[in-house]
Image (cartoon, helix red, strand yellow):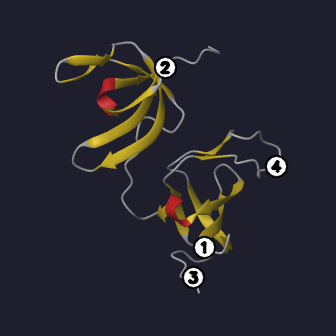
Amino acid sequence: MMNYRFNEGDKVRLIRTVRNDGTYPGKNRGDLLISRGAVGYVTDTGTFLLDQIIYAVHFLEENLLIGCREEELIDAAEDWFPSRFQFRDKVITQIPLAIQGQILVNKGEKGEIMKTIADPNQGFHYHVHFAGETYIVPETALTLAPDPAD
């Protein structure tokens, strides 16, 4: 028997951005469904492949009902520190990135956020992919890249 952390009616916060994995109707695979930080209410619980707890969460502000894995949610009353960037955001370096004086990424190079690392003492860091290489970069060294559609 699986132990559910949340119950029907619990107010929860999403800690990871959720994109369409191909199961959400009317959206393309990879489309953003809901951003990290959104708050919703558990409407139902279930399992996937017998080993993953899934919660149906109604995000009232966005009027969306999304299936969320347990590890994607926290109690809405828990401390929450939003980051500037999220998965798949395009960013630009504000400074050169170097290790022991060797420049690995020049100032102004464009990368893509692959993962967010939150540390209450050191702030946010990101796994950022730059032209075939991925580095851990502090939030202060990055800025959001302009949208090419603008």
The residue positioned 54% from the left and 74% from the top of the image is 6
Disc 4 to disc 1: CB gap under 8 Å: no
Can residue 9 be seen here? The reply is yes
| SS at circle 3 | loop
Work out whether mark 1 precedes mark 2 in sequence or the reverse, and give the earlier one. Answer: 1
**Residue at the image point whose x is 48% and y is 53% from the top:** 15
Quickly name the residue at label 3: 2
Q: CA distance from mark 1 to mark 2?
A: 39 Å
Quick one: label 2 or label 4, which is nearer the N terminus?
Answer: 4
Q: Which mark is residue 145?
A: 2
Badge 2 amino acid: Ala
Q: Amino acid at mark 1?
A: Asp
Q: Label 4: which residue?
A: 25
SS for tag 4?
loop
Distance (Cα) linking label 1 and label 3 = 8 Å
Which of disc 3 and disc 2 is earlier in sequence?
Answer: 3
The three-letter amino acid code for the residue at tag 3 is: Met
Element under disc 1 = loop
- Nearer to us of marks 2 and 3 is 3
Q: Of circles 1 and 3, which is in front?
A: 1
For the image, the number of numbered tags is: 4
Q: Residues within 10 Å of mark 3 (few under 14, many from 20)?
A: few
